[in-house]
Amino acid sequence: MPISDQAGGHSAGRPRWISAGATDQGRVRNVNQDAYLDRPELGLWAVADGMGGHAEGAHASRAIIDALAALPRTALLGRRARAIITALRRVNDDLLAYAAAMRADLIGSTVVVLTAARNHAAILWTGDSRVYRLRAGQLDCLTTDHSQVQFLVDEGLLAPELAESHPSANVLLRAVGSEEDLKVDYRLERLQAGDRFLLCSDGLYRELDNAALTSLLANDGPGRSAPELVRQACEHGGRDNVTAVVMSV
């Protein structure tokens, strides 16, 4: 989809955002390689899930979040989205160089970003971290995983209900730091009053089903739902690092 500078649109009143984030290393991992950004005053949120060993994965996710946090503020949503992609590509180049210097096979991270201006939001992602939207009681996943199992599902070679238990469930086809030509998917959404969004790493949605996500998002504000989502994911197994960022319009 082309990224237009008019994407922010115009409305009589600007949406007011309330947001909160939470993260935990989980019950199995010794180090938390997740990182997140929660900047409602900038209309900018992100979750990154690092890969490539303990310190290396954490380095990758933090590099992404730091690069996004340093972006200049702009009112034009299209310009902001392009700046995000440019920043991610710079981090991608840096991680490739860092991995070569460290003689590591891969030092990378997934990332999902939501940025909002007026009555629109742009969603950008690479990897299998996700964005969910709760609208009028209906929960929808707005991103498509860049994973081996999602490719098999899309090709009709694997039933969706078997994806989570497939041996290749953790194999990614895309991530920042995984290849020279970084591809970032982009989606534009028009906002409605009452919308609630969840950005999360795979450590969350692999432990909690859609019914649990819907209930927790619907019944509490971001300040309660974000840490509660992380806490319940840990209680349900916590097999990976867990991160959640929740935003309400």
Image (tube, rainbow, N blue to C red):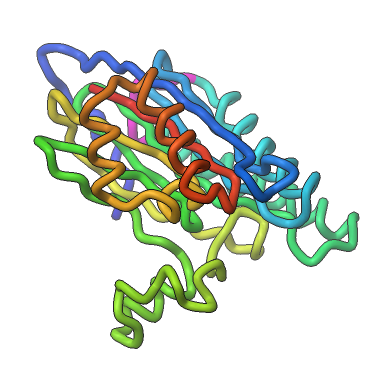
**Depth check, front residue: 151 or 217:** 217
- Residue 241: name its quadrant: top right
Q: Check residue 74 for magenta coloring.
A: yes
Q: In percent of the image, x 32 and y 83: which residue is there? A: 155
Q: On the picture, is 192 further left or further right than 242? A: left
Q: Quadrant of residue 159?
A: bottom left
Based on the displayed image, in which of its 4 quarters is residue 78 positioned?
top left
- Magenta span has 39? no
Q: Nearer the viewer, residue 174 or 30?
A: 30
Q: Position of residue 105 (x, y in %)?
A: 79, 66
Q: Choose between 190 and 240: the one closer to the eye.
A: 240
Quarter of the N terminus within the rendering = bottom left
Q: Is residue 184 visible?
A: no
Residue 140 position, x and y percent, is 22, 49
The image quadrant where one finds the C terminus is top left
* Vertical relation: 76 (above or below) 54: above
Residue under the point 22% across and 26% down: 219
Question: From where the camera sits, is residue 206 visible?
Answer: yes
Q: Position of residue 210 (x, y in %)?
A: 27, 50
The relative height of residue 67 versus residue 40 in the rendered view (above or below) is below
Residue visible at 81% across and 57% down in the picture:
99
Name the residue located 50 percent from the left edge and 57 percent from the top edge.
127
Is residue 150 left or right of 95 when viewed as pictured? left
Image location of residue 170, percent across then percent down: 55, 67
Q: How many marks?
A: 0
Magenta residues?
73-79
